[in-house]
Image: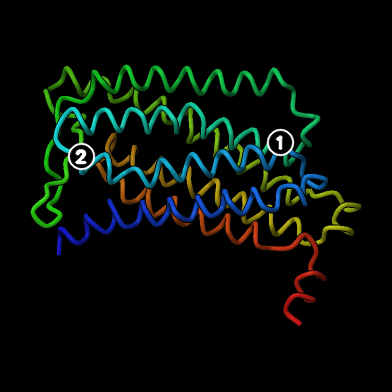
């Protein structure tokens, strides 16, 4: 039963969440040309790449744990985290800024700063991650095949001292970036201009779902780090994968809603 729990949350849920985000990326690619006049091209470009990157990050979790012992988990994890921190966080933030402010009102220097910040944090994370991980251990058995994961706290105090740095880097990007983006979108939904609401009366609801998705994603990742730092409970990544799946379902709901309620009534008449 214990192995089933580990297999479900370390293989099944990440792959399922990854598929959800791949489908979201495909859907965004499809509807982007039709809705760029409302939300701007930068919004859908950022959302497309954000969903695609997050889908790859989530779906590649089984590769990290099933390819063999150290250093395989470390190598795969470092690649995954570099992409997550360096590209996903900035892409989603830029997409949300474009959604709220309009593509033409997002300064190019801000876009460069966000991606520069993300890539800088990602590079530093990989360097510290290599120093922090002292080996790997079997976390469960998948039939006769052992699943390995890197152990940050293996190797004594010399390795554990790197943990606050890794936590801080993840806190900056993607946790705080995506959380701030979610708050901005919720604020925009609450203060959606009345003249636009008369034309796109379903837009505030779409924004609420989207903002909630960003917050669910960031809070689930934050909770994993807090459990380790304050309760000394490591590797509870299943919480994050469940949170990412929930965020994906909220994003699906947001994107599936039409811009106008009248369209929804017509579709279901």
Residue 181 horizontal/vertical position (percent): 61, 38
The image shows residue 77, relative to residue 219, as above or below, that is: above
Pair 1/2: label in front = 2
Tell me the tag on residue 42: 1
Question: Which residue is painted at 55% across and 18% down in the image?
Answer: 116
Tell me the tag on residue 134: none
Q: Is residue 222 left or right of residue 179?
A: left
What is the quadrant of residue 4 in the picture? bottom left
**Quarter in which the C terminus is drawn:** bottom right
Tell me if mark 2 has few (under 14), some (14-19) or many (20+) residues whose alpha carbon lies within 10 angstroms of its own: some
241, 30: nearer the viewer: 30
Q: Is residue 59 left or right of residue 63?
A: right
**Quarter in which the N terminus is drawn:** bottom left
In the image as oriented, which residue stretches furthest toward the left?
144
Q: What SS does tag 1 mark? A: helix
Q: Is residue 252 left or right of residue 100?
A: left
What is the quadrant of residue 159 in the picture? top left
Tell me if mark 1 has few (under 14), some (14-19) or many (20+) residues whose alpha carbon lies within 10 angstroms of its own: many
Question: Which residue is painted at 57% across and 30% down in the image?
Answer: 90
The image shows residue 161, relative to residue 219, as above or below, that is: above
Marks 1/2: CA–CA distance: 37 Å
Residue 47 horizontal/vertical position (percent): 61, 42
For disc 2, the marked residue is 67
21, 174: nearer the viewer: 21
């Amino acid at each position: 039963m214990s192995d089933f729990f580990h297999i479900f949350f370390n293989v099944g849920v990440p792959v399922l969440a990854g598929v959800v985000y791949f489908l979201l990326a495909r859907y965004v690619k499809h509807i982007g040309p039709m809705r760029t006049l409302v939300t701007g091209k930068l919004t859908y470009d950022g959302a497309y790449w954000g969903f695609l990157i997050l889908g790859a990050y989530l779906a590649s979790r089984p590769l990290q744990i099933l390819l063999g012992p150290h250093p395989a988990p470390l190598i795969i994890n470092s690649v995954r985290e570099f992409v997550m921190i360096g590209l996903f966080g900035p892409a989603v933030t830029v997409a949300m800024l474009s959604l709220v402010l309009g593509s033409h009102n997002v300064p190019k220097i801000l876009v460069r700063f966000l991606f520069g910040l993300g890539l800088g944090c990602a590079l530093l994370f990989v360097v510290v991650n290599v120093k922090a991980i002292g080996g790997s251990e079997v976390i469960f058995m998948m039939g006769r095949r052992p699943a390995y994961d890197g152990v940050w706290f293996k190797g004594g105090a010399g390795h554990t001292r790197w943990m606050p740095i890794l936590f801080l880097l993840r806190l900056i990007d993607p946790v705080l970036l995506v959380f701030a983006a979610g708050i901005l979108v919720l604020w925009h939904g609450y203060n959606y201009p009345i003249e636009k609401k008369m034309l796109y009366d379903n837009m505030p609801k779409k924004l609420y779902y989207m903002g909630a998705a960003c917050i669910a994603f960031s809070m689930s990742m934050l909770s994993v780090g807090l459990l380790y730092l304050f309760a000394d409970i490591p590797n509870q990544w299943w919480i994050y994968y469940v949170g990412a799946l929930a965020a994906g379902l909220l994003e699906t709901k947001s994107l599936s809603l039409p811009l106008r309620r009248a369209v929804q009534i017509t579709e279901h008449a």
